[in-house]
Amino acid sequence: MAVVPKFVGERIKRREDPRLISGTATYVDDVRLPDTLAAVVLRSPYPHARINSIDVAAARSAPGVVAVLTGGDLKDKVGGIPCVAPAEHIPFHPLLAQGKVRFVGESVAIVVASDAYKAQDAADLIDVDYNPLDAVSDPEKALEDGAPVLHEEFGNNLVTRALVPNPAVDEAIAKADKVIKFRIVNQRLAPVPMEPRGVLANWHQASGHLTIWTSTQIPHLLRSGLAAVLGLPENRVRVIAPEVGGGFGAKLNFYREEALVAYLSRMLGRPVKWIERRRENLAATTHGRDQITYLEVPVKKDGTVLGIKAKFICDMGAYLQLLTPAIPGFSGLMMTGCYKIPAMSFEQVMVFTNKMATDAYRGAGRPEAAYIAERTMDMVAGELGLDPVEVRRRNFIPKEAFPYATCAGLVYDSGDYNAALNKALEIVDYPKMRAEQADALKHGRYVGIGIASYVEICGLGPSVMLPPKVPGWESATVRMEPDSRVTVLTGISPHGQGQETTFAQMAADAFGIDIDDVAVVHGDTAIVQYGVGTFGSRGLSVGGAALMMSVGKVQDKLKKIASTMMEAPPDQLTFANRTVALKSDAAKSIPLQAVVDAAYGWKMPIPGMEPGLDATSVFEPAGCTFPFGTHISVVEIDPDTGVVKFLRYIAVDDCGNIISPLLVAGQVHGGIAQGIAQALYEEVVYDENGQLVTATLMDYAAPRAQMLPRYELAHTVTPSPLNPMGVKGVGEAGTIGSTPCVVNAVMDALKPLGIRHIDMPLRPEKLWRAIKDAKKA
Amino acid sequence: MFPGQFEYHRAASIKDALDLLKRYGDDAKLLSGGHSLIPMMKLRLAQPAHLIDVTKIAEMRAISESGGKIVIGAAASHDAVANSSLVRDKLGLLAEAAAAIGDVQVRNRGTIGGSLTHADPAADYPAAVLALEGEIKLERDGGARTIKAADFFLDLMTTAVQPGELLSQIAFAPIPTGTGYSYQKYPHPASGFAMVGVAALVSLDRSGKIASSRVGVTGLGAKAFRASAVEAALAGKAADAATIAAAAARTADGIDALGDIHASSEYRAELARVYARRTIQAAVARAKA
Ligand SMILES: Cc1cc2nc3c(=O)[nH]c(=O)nc-3n(C[C@H](O)[C@H](O)[C@H](O)COP(=O)(O)OP(=O)(O)OC[C@H]3O[C@@H](n4cnc5c(N)ncnc54)[C@H](O)[C@@H]3O)c2cc1C
């Protein structure tokens, strides 16, 4: 029989891909149930308006229409959308607007008909009498006296104020050689997953069971949320996340339509489906970022950073989604980055505006932090006339200092920041690149080199770090089936990350079986034990750790049984090549199948042992992991047009041990694409009256392949001590390293012109204007 | 994105299409690649009750040479134009413009007739069709007329096509050997359309001076246009960088430039000047080669 190879660490192609690239995957819209009705949501064209009346008579009597609901029909019948993060002001978040709309795209009515065309025809017949109100889209203006108030019950637009004071920062400011002050903006972004959201609900009247297929990252948490909002027992609600075409944090949430469609299915006793259109996705799926930060950075002449003091204005939008006010916290806590900065303090003012809610978006608070830290390092270098590499080296947390407790109270698990920086510098050939840059400038060419050494939080996380009802543990069941194939049931809910591959690699190696002998099942609450979900780069480091716990339990049982069959102590046994073998002599083995047969009780050799081969475990991490790395980009700016061209892009990422190199590369590629897009292209724009300008992909500049450079990827490996695999997580790293790296490169190119900072996205026009003005001056 | 209800008709011939147009009048729209019309229908900005598909009419898809002209059927896809050896050999500028449109899927479905009739201010083709002085044939019940490209584009998404008319083909004189050409665009970062696009044709006389030039510009204003001030400034001059730069500086003269969040009107005008300069330079370099 052929030898079974090892899989962990090998370049394994994703086992998910054949169905994805052949168009045979099953997304929500591909699930077809007989007699399904279609729902269409009518949305507000106004950013802020009172609803005087809604006339649905014509819609109700339109052909094919089964039901039309407005906010009034739901009043007191169903709960609101939960926000589990603490905040001073949490407004009631209705499923359909109640008396007032507060952002463009807010759901006002829902129409259910025999098909989506008829539902849309009927929706067009609904007559809403709006009384438009003044709106506010600028979060700083929203705080001013006299600003239009979104939620009258609070009297103003404050969501909450978070304070992390530290007098040591003010002392440092008083003593510093220099205090560098600046304001930077992390603009609002739209996650734009390829598959928009979608929900299919099927209420089974006779048994009182509700089944929901929805495009989500958190099927279990959503089950709990739905049960609560609809007043159903949790054991009567089944949530299925079928194939999910990307989430990026936007599907780490609980949306109005999920509850609405479920409510309607129960009301009508028929399956109801709603599929989000792209315009709805841009207007009514959560956005990310949208933070303004004012910084004061006391420094010594030699580039030592003595502290960071920050004030954040965080735009939460009109309502609070699941984690909305929790996101900025990460930005504050992580803004000291890779640096042994002795003191930090911050104030965060979170604000309601007439816009869609913000919430997690790839990186969720850490990209903002890395942007602050890495722009700070370049600002320090620029103001003191030092090399940005030198400033970073001077302030790095040294590798001997890990585990390192930061001044913000976080404990970084492991790191070697110089190693990643050195490797990136070596790849780019830094001294040579600087010489080429100087030479280019002599010829009137603006070349810039940008460095970003980032650190971020992954493996979310110990439960204490997360809000209530979004715990940080993860679960896994491992079952060796009677034919010695393995089924893994994981509580995470991958939607592009690829754990069907990595988990199969890990389980295959653990049992000495082939990767094709492992099936990884996820995303169905009726099949999989309660779990938490996929976000915060936790799939492998938390979910994988739970998997390994269960693997260990099944291995132990197999070894115990085999030990009686082989007359060898269990700890002398190992799994290889579909056998249980002596560690010392692989030739002395028995087939794995023989042990499995025994375990299933046909020839159970241990009297009294419980038959079967499965185990369920929950892993509660002791802490978060802190992946890091250095990205370097080299760009050239066309002074005639302001267009940025990439000459090089180097990413050195340290995500601990690597289980699946191709998957890591894929995550880094996608992450860099989204990070570069924040730096150069993307911005959700609402005009000053709250109207959504980037309402379609004709206006919202999501990146495409030709807008991106070729990536040169490399790694350093610093294992995490916090999980048995020594992994850290890599889902967001690319996004976090790339944004500051690209902005730093562009600013470096424009430094000879005396340009200090330009806010993202660095559209060609902004650069062209800055260059023109600088040349005039 | 669900369009209103409509009836689909597949026209077998131009006559068939014209009959259907006559029968349904204002309730009907011609359907070519559908890449502009269908998005509008999905947004319910257009709600025609009848669609008349012209893409199955063989003569409207044909690309041929006749009477010394290259004739492109209105329903020829962007991809067919970009990859036709006839067009590449004799009408290279048009092939370049076609290849610059959208992506593979868009080029496989979108058609030249649809693009010209839709007259999106940022469409690529109009710049090239203007510079190539295409002759556009419009058929109607009981007759046909041919109008010059320069008379075709009237305003924002408005052309000389009258109700009941169908654009059947566009004819071009081949580009003479020795004439250099280039089409260059700055793609809009979101839509991929031309933020500005410039098509230039330049021929030099024996002494290397510019004998004639034709410059078409798209993306800048409400409609594509010939940059006649630029052409005048080039005429009879040495084909050097200074002349080209001075001429290109007049690209946006008299144009009410469009603006959006990605490019204000002021910046678009500057982009047009820069792209005109680069495009003319490239055309001159090819004319010299
Ligand atoms: C994602 C995307 C990206 C795109 N990118 C670009 C780009 O970069 N550059 C660019 O130039 N374009 C771009 N387009 C537009 C594309 O080129 C369209 O194909 C083109 O604008 C319209 O051509 P069509 O054949 O699809 O016309 P249709 O959509 O079928 O029709 C457009 C209009 O013309 C009318 N019409 C069609 N044929 C005739 C005819 N023979 N006679 C009279 N009237 C007729 C129709 O009734 C309709 O009003 C893009 C489109 C999409 C969807």
Image (cartoon, grey):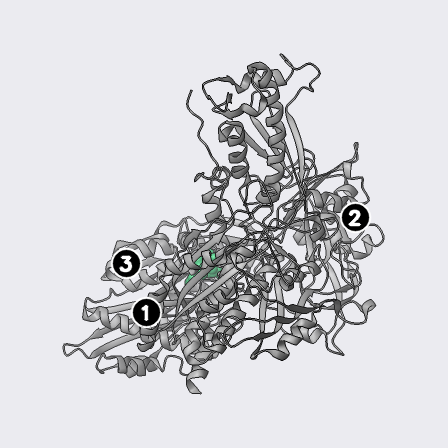
Q: Is mark 3 within 8 Å of ligand 1?
A: no
Q: Quadrant of ligand 1?
A: bottom left
Q: Assign the N terminus of chain A to one quadrant of the image.
A: top left
* Residue at the farthest right position: A76
**Point 27% across, 73% down: residue:** B281
| Residue B87 tag number | 3
- The label on residue A302 is none
User: Residue A435: percent from the left, percent from the top?
Assistant: 33, 70
Name the one closer to the observer, A433 or B195. Answer: A433
- Residue at x 55% of width, y 32% of height: A507
**Residue B27 relative to residue A43: left or right:** left
The numbered mark, 1 or 2, whose residue comes first in the sequence reads 2
Q: Residue furthest front?
A: A400
Identity, as a three-letter code, of the amino acid under mark 3: Val
Position of residue A20 in the picture relative to residue A438 (left or right): right
- Residue tagged 1: A436
Looking at the image, can residue B222 be seen?
no
Badge number at residue A229: 2
Q: Is residue B93 above or below residue A136?
A: above
Which is more toward the observer, A362 or A81? A362
